[in-house]
C-alpha cells in the first residue's frame, strides 16, 4: 500500500502496478481498463509518490508475477545487477534528473541500458514532460545494420510500405518505384500482405529480392507475415531477409499473437544460420494490444508496452517500431494522447537500447488529423527517431489508415538537415536521384528500366 496526503485528502494505491497506472498521463485505454486515475489530483499524487520511489523497489516487486509470466522472467534474467549498483541508491525522480544532466552522455546511456528494467524506464517516463522525453532520447544512439546502417546521428531512415489490397505485383512495384525516387526505403521495403497463402508470400519475397538485385541497391526487404510463415519459407530457401513479428509485454498477449519466446528464438537461430545480415529481426508493438487480448493483468498500457521492449532486445533486432495510433481511439483517443504515447514509446525503447522507429499514424475514427501527425513527426525527428513510414500519399490502401508519405520524410530531412542511411545515400547519388539536398525525380524512366530487368 502506498499513500500520500495532499490538501487534507489521502490518496491510496494498492500496489506498485496501481501506483504506476494512476501516475500515467491520461489516455482512453487505461480508462477502458479501469486502471486510470479518477482525477488530475490523483494522478499528481501518484506521480509524487512515484518520484520518491527507490529504484530498488522494482527488483523486489513485480507488476506481473514471474511465476506465471515468461516476459517477467526474461526481464529478471536481462537485468545486470552489477551495473545496477551504480544507480541503485537513486529514486525515480533522481533518475530523471540524472538522465537529463549534462554528464549523462550518449556513452553513459549506452552503458546504463542493462542496468535498467522496463518498469524503471516506464516509471521515469511517467514523471517527465514531453520536452524531457525528447531531450534524453536525442542523446541515445542505437545503431543496427543489415545492408544499410540504421540509427546513426544525423540520419533518418524510412520503411517503404508499398501495400496493395490484393497483393498485385504491378501495384506494389509502382509504389516501390515511386518510393525509391523519393529516397525512401533505406530501413526496409516492407509489405503487409493481404493473404497468408504461403505460395503467394514466397512470390512476394522473391519479387522484392529480385528488385534489390536488379537495381543493386543496399536495401533489405520483408513481407510482414506471421513469423512461423517466415521460418517455413526460409527453410524452403526463399530469400527471407528479416523475420517479422508483432509482440507484446506479457506472455498472454504474445500467445494471442501466436508466438512465444521459444518461437522467436527459433527464428533468431535460423537467421543466424542464413547469415544474410548482422541484425535480422523486425518487431512491431503498440499500446493497447495487451488489453485487446485480455492479457494486461491490470497493468497500464504504457508500462506493459515498455515490457515488450525486453522481448525485442533479447533478439538484437534491426528495427522496432511502435504503431502508435493504429490500434485506435479506444486506446489513444486523440492527437494529444497519440503524441504523448509516441514520445514515451520512443524514449523508453531507445533508453533500453532498441533501434526505435514510429508509425506516425491515426485511424479514420480517431479525434486526430494530419496536423497532429505533422507535429509528432517533427518532434520525433528532433528526438532522433531511427525511421518512419513512407506510404504513397500517406494513405494505406490496404490497411485503411493515415500515416506518413514519401514527401513527409523529405520535409523532415530538409528541415532538420538529416540524411538517409550512408550506403543508401551513396546509391542514390550514383543513380543521380539525390545530390545531398535535393530529390531528382526525372530519373523515373531509368529506375523503371532497371526494375524491368
Image (cartoon, helix red, strand yellow):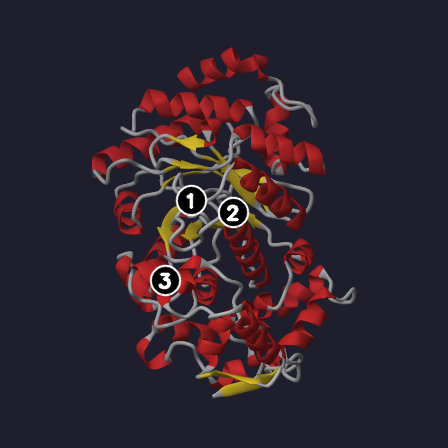
Within 10 angstroms of label 2, few (less than 14), some, or many (20 or more) residues?
Answer: many
Whether pointer 1 and pointer 2 mark residues with C-beta atoms closer than 8 Å, the reply is yes
**Would you say residue 262 is visible in this rendering?**
no
Residue 13, position as x, y percentages in the image: 47, 82
Residue located 34% across and 20% down the image:
170
Q: Look at the numbered disc 2 and give the secondary structure of its residue.
A: helix
The disc label shown at residue 32, or none: 3
Residue located 37% across and 25% down the image:
172
Q: Is residue 345 left or right of residue 65?
A: right
Residue 49, position as x, y percentages in the image: 58, 80
The number of discs equals 3
Question: Label 3, label 1: how many angstroms apart (C-alpha)?
Answer: 16 Å
Q: Earlier in the sequence, mark 3 or mark 1?
A: 3
Q: Which residue position is annotated with label 2?
A: 335
- 72 or 292, nearer to the observer: 292
- 254 or 7, nearer to the observer: 7
The disc label shown at residue 366, or none: 1
Q: Look at the numbered disc 1 and give the secondary structure of its residue.
A: loop
Residue located 44% across and 62% down the image:
305
Q: Examine the image and state in which quarter residue 212 appears.
A: top left
Q: Look at the numbered disc 3 and give the secondary structure of its residue.
A: helix
Question: Label 2, label 3: how many angstroms apart (C-alpha)?
Answer: 18 Å
**Would you say residue 204 is visible in this rendering?**
yes
Question: Label 1, label 2: how many angstroms apart (C-alpha)?
Answer: 8 Å
Q: Earlier in the sequence, mark 2 or mark 3?
A: 3
The disc label shown at residue 104, or none: none
Q: Residue farthest to the bottom?
A: 1
- 199 or 38, nearer to the observer: 38
Residue located 35% across and 62% down the image:
290
Amino acid at each position: 500500500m502506498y499513500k500520500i496526503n495532499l490538501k487534507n485528502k489521502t490518496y491510496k494505491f494498492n500496489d506498485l502496478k496501481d501506483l504506476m497506472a494512476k501516475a500515467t498521463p491520461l489516455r482512453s485505454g487505461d480508462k477502458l481498463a479501469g486502471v486510470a486515475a479518477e482525477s488530475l489530483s490523483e494522478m499528481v499524487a501518484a506521480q509524487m509518490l512515484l518520484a520518491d520511489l527507490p529504484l530498488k523497489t522494482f527488483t523486489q516487486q513485480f507488476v506481473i508475477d514471474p511465476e506465471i509470466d515468461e516476459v517477467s522472467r526474461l526481464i529478471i534474467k536481462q537485468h545486470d545487477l552489477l551495473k545496477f549498483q551504480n544507480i541503485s541508491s537513486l529514486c525515480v525522480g533522481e533518475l530523471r534528473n540524472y538522465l537529463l544532466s549534462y554528464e549523462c552522455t550518449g556513452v553513459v546511456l549506452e552503458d546504463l541500458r542493462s542496468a535498467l528494467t522496463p518498469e524503471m524506464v516506464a516509471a521515469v517516463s511517467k514523471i517527465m514532460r514531453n520536452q524531457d522525453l525528447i531531450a534524453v532520447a536525442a542523446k541515445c544512439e542505437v545503431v543496427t545494420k543489415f545492408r544499410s546502417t540504421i540509427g546513426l546521428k544525423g540520419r533518418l531512415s524510412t520503411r517503404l510500405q508499398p501495400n496493395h489490397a490484393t497483393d498485385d505485383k504491378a501495384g506494389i512495384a509502382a509504389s516501390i518505384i515511386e518510393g525509391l525516387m523519393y529516397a525512401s526505403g533505406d530501413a526496409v521495403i516492407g509489405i503487409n500482405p493481404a493473404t497468408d497463402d504461403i505460395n503467394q508470400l514466397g512470390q512476394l519475397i522473391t519479387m522484392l529480392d529480385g528488385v534489390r538485385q536488379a537495381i543493386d541497391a543496399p536495401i533489405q526487404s520483408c513481407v510482414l507475415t506471421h513469423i512461423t510463415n517466415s521460418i517455413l519459407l526460409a527453410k524452403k530457401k526463399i530469400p527471407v531477409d528479416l523475420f517479422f513479428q508483432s509482440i507484446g509485454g506479457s506472455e498472454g498477449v504474445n500467445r494471442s499473437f501466436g508466438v512465444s519466446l521459444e518461437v522467436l528464438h527459433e527464428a533468431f537461430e535460423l537467421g543466424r544460420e542464413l547469415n544474410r545480415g548482422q541484425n535480422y529481426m523486425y518487431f512491431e508493438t503498440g499500446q493497447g494490444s495487451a488489453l485487446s487480448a485480455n492479457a494486461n493483468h491490470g497493468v497500464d498500457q504504457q508500462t506493459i508496452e515498455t515490457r515488450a521492449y525486453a522481448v525485442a532486445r533479447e533478439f538484437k533486432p534491426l528495427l522496432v517500431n511502435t504503431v502508435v495510433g493504429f490500434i485506435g481511439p479506444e486506446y489513444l483517443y486523440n492527437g494529444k494522447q497519440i503524441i504523448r504515447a509516441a514520445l514515451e514509446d520512443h524514449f523508453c525503447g531507445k533508453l533500453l537500447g532498441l533501434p526505435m522507429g514510429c508509425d506516425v499514424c491515426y485511424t479514420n475514427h480517431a479525434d486526430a488529423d494530419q496536423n497532429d501527425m505533422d507535429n509528432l513527426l517533427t518532434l520525433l525527428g528532433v528526438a532522433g527517431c531511427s525511421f518512419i513510414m513512407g506510404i504513397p500519399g500517406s494513405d494505406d490502401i490496404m490497411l485503411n489508415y493515415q500515416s506518413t508519405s514519401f514527401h513527409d520524410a523529405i520535409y523532415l530531412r530538409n528541415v532538420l538537415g538529416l540524411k538517409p542511411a550512408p550506403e543508401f545515400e551513396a546509391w542514390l547519388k550514383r543513380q543521380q536521384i539525390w545530390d545531398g539536398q535535393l530529390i531528382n525525380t526525372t530519373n523515373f524512366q531509368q529506375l523503371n528500366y532497371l526494375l524491368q530487368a
